[in-house]
Amino acid sequence: MNKLYNIIFIFFLLFISTTSLANTYPKDSLKVLLNKGYYEFSHNDYPESVRLGRLLLQRSYDSNDLEYEAEALYLLAINDEAVEEYARAKEKYNKVIEIAEKLRDTLFVIDVYNGLGNIAAVYDNDHQKSREYYLKALELSDKINNTDRITFIINLCWEYLDAKEYKEVPAYLKDLQQYLDGNKTVTDPSDAGDKCHVFYILGRYYAGIKEFDKGSDYLDKAVAIAKEFDLDEEEADAYKARAELYIGLNRPDKAYKALEDYISAYKKNSKLAMLNKMQIEEVKYKLQEYERTLEVAEKEKKLADSVAASKSKLNTVYLVVSFLLLLSLVFIYRENLSKKKLIKSLHKNNQELALAKKQASKAAEAKTNFVSNVSHELRTPLHGVIGITSLLLGEKEISEKNKRLLKSLKFSGDYLLSLINNVLLISKIDNNKIKIIPKPFKVSFFFENLKHSVEYSAVKKNVKLNFLIGKDVPKVIVLDENILSEVLINLMENAIKFSHNGNVSVGIEKIRNNEDTVVLRFTVLDDGIGIPEEQKKQIFQKFSQLIENQSIMEGAGLGLSIVKSLLEQMNSEIHLESKPNQGARFYFDVTTDLVADTKEVDIDDLQEKNVNFKGKKIILVEDNEINKLVLKKFLDCYEVQLEVFSDGDSGFESISSNKYDLALLDINIPGLNGYEITERVRKFDKELPIVAVTASELTEIEDFAFEAGMNDILIKPFNKSKLLEILNKYLS
């Protein structure tokens, strides 16, 4: 090892002695160095490119050549930018600006302004500064007729679009169109990138000013050219913009498809970005090593210069240089050993983390399946309990005493069902399976359903309910009614729980109108015990309770956690105002589309007295005797012809040989299951309405059900109004 150190030391001194003899270098040799540096940069060999750049910089200093000093600094700056060392890149770009202005090299200044604009946007997040740099570059380009001006126009328009300043873009539309006219066919990937960016800019602009047809056409062209030249990042950007365009058109189906395409392209680009990030980190490490070695070399060069200036101290200087070199090499060697150990440890930890992640994923999947299976097994008997209780409550001969008992039983069943639904909802939220499906519904009818949902709880606690609808609130709004109902019921149940003998008010008011939308505020107000300041954040956590007073402790502590998570899915957030013993006010804002003509909207406002199903022939395939009884009792009052079968084989045989107006099929039944029956029936009968009647979770079966050919899904346990809605839909 000592021999190696001595050899390195001697070689280094020889290198210093030979290089110090020459003070100037021909421009041709400097140009060769510069070209080699750009070649290594273009092939991603950044350490070698930096080495050549530093050598060029040193030789330009020795030659007092400002032109190549600026070239060397620019080469080093773009290397720094490539490995995300933006602060160092910015410093070098500013030095280049000073030199280029002295040399009056406008083209050089333009390139540097573009680089500074990129750094201001990406690193400093100073978009105003970024625009100033791009505008300077564009202004100078116009003065010298620079053909690369389209790059600055693209960057500038991109900044305006990200800030939604659409009024600034028209000034450059002519330039963008001229570029497209002059580049109808491209073969070079860099030209393809510019053309793809132009299409993307035009697509986003026209979508932003509501000219959706033009916007869609340009975005389609951006996608096409991105696919042709494997421009994954540009393809992902175009799909994302297309999704936003379809959202503006209120086309959720096409927006969803565009988002799927965006996710697919983003995943491809993310993999490349991750690989590129790893390569950049590796290059950074190599550059740091190189910088350390270079610092040592520069120190020793200074020492060698000192030796040449003072021969009397030559031996002492040699000794010091040898010692420093040896010390530096030992330090670098030890640093390398330490880094290797660290890398080995990190690799081991990454493997352990990957294994833990895999095990956690399996555990989460097992938990989800368990929750789903248990909920299915609980829903089936609950359907019988709630259904039979509802039927008995409808009997006129039931005494008031027994009615009170039945109401208590129904409340207990509904409460247990609510708890099961909440556990399922938490599981779906944790696994990102919540789908927001906005549909139009009538506000007054929605509030009436809310009242029925919590009425028994309010009576039990002697709480007076007040429902307030603002005068300027639209009669029909477009939101996900089920999600909104889940949020408000949880807030109301929470308010009732802590407002014994008090008042709970639920209100909706209009906050403001936008162009095609309206912002509404929903408020739940109570005069209960209030919430201390230190517990306001805690109550939105899972399984959290406000106090530990067992006389008030009810529920599983999931309600407010569900509220918070569901509102996040709706791009909203819950707000809380409360003081101890002064009640609490929960509110949230949501944005809804305006419905132009409420007369044409199909509102679920069906009244039982308006229906007539007499003589309609219905087949029910169900293996649970209690569920058969409940459905039969529900349907008796409508004078329908009901035929019941307990297994799939006999049910399919009857459908094959008889004419029915409606088929109600359980999914999990002996023999042929509900999907198999439907698939076989659809081979000879495309018109028969088939409804799945199941206790399974909707998201678990809906894809399978509709793919098999079913028309609708009825989730057990259900109330009579839900069944009535299905009957009216397919029998009226």
Image (cartoon, helix red, strand yellow):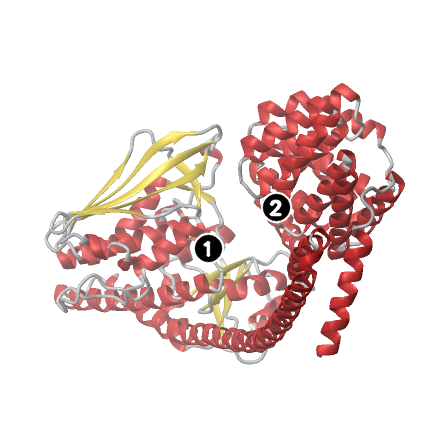
What's under tag 2, amino acid-wise? Answer: Arg
Instruction: Farthest residue to the front: give it.
Output: 312
Residue 455: % across, % down: 22, 54
| Relative horizontal placement of residue 619, taking residue 414 as reference (left or right) | right
Question: What amino acid is at disc 1?
Answer: Ile
User: Could you say where residue 1 lies in the image, as x and y percent from the top left?
Assistant: 71, 79
Q: Residues within 10 Å of mark 1 (few under 14, many from 20)?
A: some
* 541 and 623: which is toward the camera: 541
Q: Residue at x 17, y 63 (%)?
A: 547
Residue at the disc numbered 2 = 88
39 horizontally vs 344: left or right = right
In-front residue for pair 101/39:
101
From the image, tell me which residue sits under label 1: 726
Looking at the image, residue 350 sits to the left or right of residue 28; the answer is left
Kindly indicate the quadrant of the structure image that contains residue 681. bottom right
Can you see residue 292? yes
- Determine the residue positioned at 62% across, 62% down: 707
How far is disc 2 from disc 1 in space, using C-alphas?
Answer: 68 Å
Q: Is residue 241 visible?
A: no
Looking at the rendered structure, the secondary structure element under dot 1 is helix
